[in-house]
Amino acid sequence: MPVDLLLMARYDAWATARALEAAGKLGTTTWIRPLAGPFPCLRDGAVHLVSAAVVWLARWQGRPMATGLRAAAFADAAAVQARWREVAAAVETFLVHLPEQVLEAPLAYRTATGRPRQAPLAMTILHLFTHAAYHRGQLMAAIRQLGGATVHTDLLYFLHDRGRAAG
C-alpha cells in the first residue's frame, strides 16, 4: 500500500471530522436552516460528504450501491459524525489491506445516474479525497454563512498536528 494514499485517507478522515465537528457546534435548529448555495441546508452538505465515501468504499469492495445515504435519516450533526467515524475507519482498513499491484487495475462502476464508467482504482481513491476537499470548503462556507466558527482543514495543518511538517 503506497504510504501516500494511506496518508491522504488519514488526512481526509481528520479534516472531515473537524468540519463535521464545526457543523455540530451550531446546534440542531441550524442543522436544517435553508441556505443559499450548493446544498439546501448544512445537514445535506454534511451527509453528501459522508455519503460519497460510503458509495466509493462499496464500489471498491465490489458492492455497488444504487444510492448513497439519505440526509433525512440524520437528525443532527452527532449522527453524521458517528457515521463518519465508521466510514473513515472502513476506508483506512480497506487501504491498509489493499495489494499495491491492484492500484492500476481498472475499476468498473456506475455513476449515480447509472452510466457505466471505468478508471484505475488509485484514481478513484484520489477522486474521493479531492471530492471531499471541495465539499469541505462548501461546508465551511455554509458554517460561516450561518454564523459559526470555521476550522482549518488543510493538509499542512494536519501534517503539523501530526508532527510531520517542519515549522
Image (spheres, rainbow, N blue to C red):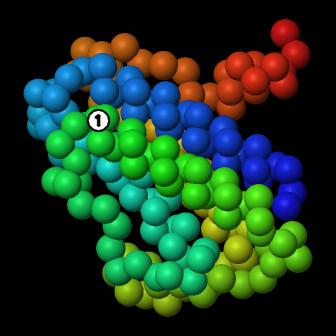
Classify residue 29 by image quadrant: top left
Give percent across and percent down for residue 4: 82, 49
Task: Give the residue at x 35% y 80%.
Answer: 66
Classify residue 21 by image quadrant: top left
Task: Give the residue at x 34% y 67%.
Answer: 68
For the view shown, which residue lies furthest in the top direction? Answer: 167
Q: Is residue 16 above or below residue 131?
A: above
Check the picture and name the quadrant holding the N terminus. Answer: bottom right
Task: Give the residue at x 66% y 54%.
Answer: 92
Give percent across and percent down for residue 165: 83, 21
Q: Amino acid at mark 1?
A: Ala
Q: Is residue 164 above or below residue 106?
A: above
Task: Give the residue at x 53% y 68%.
Answer: 56
Give percent across and percent down for residue 58: 51, 73
Q: Is residue 103 above or below residue 140?
A: below
Who is closer to the viewer here, 4 or 118?
4
Q: Secondary structure at mark 1?
A: helix
Give percent across and percent down for residue 5: 76, 53
Estimate how packed mark 1 is, as few (under 14), some (14 to 19) or many (20 or more) residues with alpha carbons within 10 Å.
many
Who is closer to the viewer here, 101 or 90?
90
Who is closer to the viewer here, 18 or 97?
97
Q: Which residue is mark 1?
A: 77
Check the picture and name the quadrant holding the C terminus. Answer: top right
Horizontal relation, residue 146 to residue 21: left or right: left
